[in-house]
Image (tube, rainbow, N blue to C red):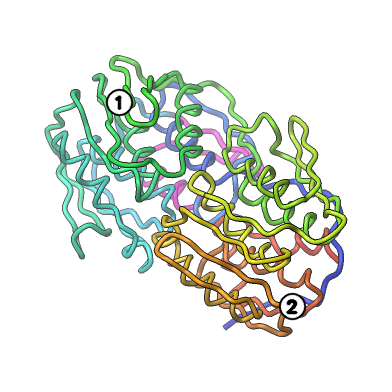
Amino acid sequence: MEFLDLSPLQHAQGAVRLPGSKSISNRTLLLAALAHGTTVIRDLLASDDTDRMLDALRTLGVAVEKTGEHDYRVVGVPNGFTNRQADLFLGNAGTAFRPLTAALALAGGHYKLSGVARMHERPIGDLVDALRQIGANINYLGREGFPPLDIKPAAIQSGGIVRIRGDVSSQFLTALLMALPTTGVETTIEVIGELISKPYIEITLKLMAQFGVIVRRDGWQRFIVPGNKRYTSPGTIYVEGDASSASYFLAAGAIAGGPVRVEGVGRNSIQGDVAFAQALEKLGAQIRMGDNWIEAAAPAGKLKAFDMDFNHIPDAAMTLAVAALFCDGPSRLTNIGSWRVKETDRIAAMATELRKVGAVVEEGTDWLRVTPPAQLLSNAVIDTYDDHRMAMCFSLVALGGVPVRINDPKCVAKTFPDYFAVYASVTR
């Protein structure tokens, strides 16, 4: 197994230009493909997940041209994908798999969708059940409720009410919202149970509005997708820097001096994960924010222990689980049940790896309690479970002045291929 040894670090300071947001990148690509007109996308994230979406769109017959290092031109196919039969491999990219499932279920073609072994363990039954309510013909090629999927042409009975659970993954609702305008008929989506990760739905709604489709909503329980309103290209669209990726550098500044500034997101961001900065502030970190940047520096003493609900920012919350190692007492993260069905079971993985550096960790179905050790253990060997966020989170351990080994560091290619080089540029 390949590994990366990080030397003991004492200080973090500097500025980082963030890569594009994965969530915004893949949503924008699909919306551009479904829209009338040509869309120029600037600052698209270069990563495994976006590569899977780009490959899929090209296979489906969408004209996608790379025009710069992070710039693309997409010619929309508002009348439907030209390729009505395809086998698509989508890796472990949930932001590609879920929305494409919905779009293809309504596209009138025959498609097979598959991914890596872990993707076949990530549930999709709630989305499939919702699509079947309007006549979609989707069958499981393996275990019931999980990919891979076989999607066949169907007589879609659009309109009326579609019900979907909101407590497993917000990507299911995102997929429905993005696909339903292609029917041309007004449809109401009713969310069953509590909707998790609401800020990610906000991203979806704001991007849909940029492409000309405005969804009305009644709180977080009812969403009315308009009829006779199709997607239209906004011309040129810029992808914000990734707010989840910002969390590692902001945490580094809060742990080890700072200031560390991230550029590409700020107070005007459409991403809910910028709330990570406010969470750090509650721990005592010094936070400054501009329109397109955020800066974090350490408090005079230790970071304060915390007990917080992370329903809204589950991805960025992983960074705080590691930051808890540097707090002045036990910390508790709650409402993180969605971690169980991510790239790995993140609650179990996080508990296992935190114990390797000396923490006492208790875990529940949707919570984690972390008691930091008096001294971090040296030379811990961190397993990353083919999960980019595990690798990036645990790089912060070295800021405790101890060496740490990160196994399979290349897994960061999912969202941030040069993460460790950028991390090295602001730490010493």
Q: Quadrant of the N terminus?
A: bottom right
Instruction: Find residue 192 and report its horizontal and vertical position in percent.
Output: 27, 39
**Going from the N terminus, do you reach mark 1 or mark 2 first?**
1
Is 352 situated left or right of 156 in this image?
right
Whole-percent x, y for residue 94 in the image: 41, 52
The picture quadrant where one finds residue 33 is top left
- 426 over 41 or under it: above or below: below
- Left or right relative to 110: residue 411: right
Query: In the image, which residues are magenta?
Result: 50-75
Quarter containing the C terminus: bottom right
Q: Residue 79 bears which disc, if any?
A: 1
Q: Amino acid at mark 2?
A: Ala
Front position in the image: 16 or 219: 219
Which element type, helix, strand or loop, lies under badge 2?
loop
Specify whether residue 43 is painted magenta: no
* Tag 1: amino acid: Asn
Question: Given the current orientation, which residue lies at the most extreme top position?
Answer: 228
Q: In this view, which residue lies farthest toward the front? A: 329
Would you name the residue on which mark 2 appears?
374
Q: Residue at x 64, y 43 (%)?
A: 70
Label 2 crowd (10 A; few <14 / some 14-19 / many >=20)? few
Residue 112, position in %: x, y?
A: 25, 53
For discs 1 and 2, the disc positioned in front in the rendered view? 2
Residue appearing at x 47%, y 66% in the figure:
347
Q: Is residue 301 above or below residue 68?
A: below
